[in-house]
Each structure stands twice: as structure tokens, then as C-alpha cells.
Image (cartoon, rainbow, N blue to C red):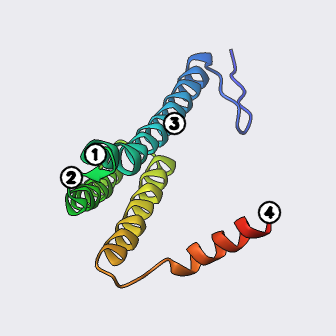
Amino acid sequence: MRETSFRGMTNSKTESKSKRDTRATLLVLRLLIQGINAFVLIVIFIGVPAITSARFGRLQLSSAPKAHRLTLWGLALAAIANAVVAVCPGKGRKERAVCLWWMGLFVALLAVKYLYFNGYIHFDWLKRALLWVQSHF
């Protein structure tokens, strides 16, 4: 019996099913990468300041440098973790791109946080703009 194959079509149903399974697995992996990184970002910017701030009435008992230091370390570790996952074998091109995108975001946030903490940049212009918007609405 003669087999005819057309361009882009497969003769075996198991091969097309395995391709679909691979694509579905990679999609779930990308969603998992996005979810984990979003969770880490929330923990770094909401959880760390909430944990490190101890107040007694209006008096703040904890130190702000500790919160800044933990935030900087968290951003650095998240960027390093994404870089390590991006270079690990067994990932597809899209998964590497997602990891590298998140690594870039964490590095950019780390740079902004470091520059702000050391006094190189200020956001007074943003405060004035928000106060102007609040006074007009």
C-alpha cells in the first residue's frame, strides 16, 4: 500500500497528539513562569515592607534601611533566578524570552530602587503632579 504525505500533514495521529501535548506543556510552563514572577514581585513590594514595619500607634519601631536592604536583595535574587532558568537547557525559545523579560524588569526595578535609596534620583515631580491632579479633581 502506498503512503501519500502532504506538506504539513502527518500520517500518524500520535505524532500530532505529541506535538499538541508539547505545545500545551510549554504554554503551562510560560503561565507558571508568569505567575511565579508576579507573586515574587508582589511579595517584594508589598509583603517585605509589611513584614518589616512594626508600629506602636504613630511611632515606627522598625528601621527603613532593613526594608530597603531586603527589597534590594529580593529583586537581585529574582533577577538571578530568572537568568538561571533562562539559560537552563530544555526550555523553548518563548520560555527563555519570558524569563529574560522578567529578568530585565527585576534588574530595572533594582536599579531604580538602588538609585532612589542612595539619593541619586527623586520623585518630587511625581508628588507635585499627583497633588496638582488631586487639587483639580
Mark 3 secondary-structure assignment: helix
Give the answer, above or below, for where 36 lies relative to 19.
below
Q: Tell me whether the residue at label 4 lies in contact with that at label 2, contact meaning CB atoms closer than 8 angstroms.
A: no
Q: Position of residue 54 (x, y in %)?
A: 25, 45
Q: Of the residues shown, which amino acid type is indicated by label 1?
A: Arg
Give the answer, above or below, for where 84 lies relative to 31.
below
Q: CA distance from mark 4 to mark 3?
A: 39 Å
Q: Of the residues shown, which amino acid type is indicated by label 2?
A: Ser
Residue at 30% over, 47% down: 48
Bin the neighbour count of mark 2 within 10 Å (Cα to Cα): few under 14, some 14-19, many 20 and up. few
Q: Which residue is mark 3?
A: 31
Q: Tell me whether the residue at label 2 lies in contact with that at label 3, contact meaning CB atoms closer than 8 angstroms.
A: no
Residue at 42% over, 58% down: 100
Q: Position of residue 23 (x, y in %)?
A: 55, 33
Residue at 26% over, 56% down: 67
Nearer the N terminus, badge 1 or badge 4? Answer: 1
Q: Which residue is mark 4?
A: 137
Q: Which residue is mark 1?
A: 55
Q: Tell me whether the residue at label 1 lies in contact with that at label 2, contact meaning CB atoms closer than 8 angstroms.
A: yes
Mark 1 secondary-structure assignment: strand
Q: Nearer the viewer, mark 1 or mark 2?
A: 1
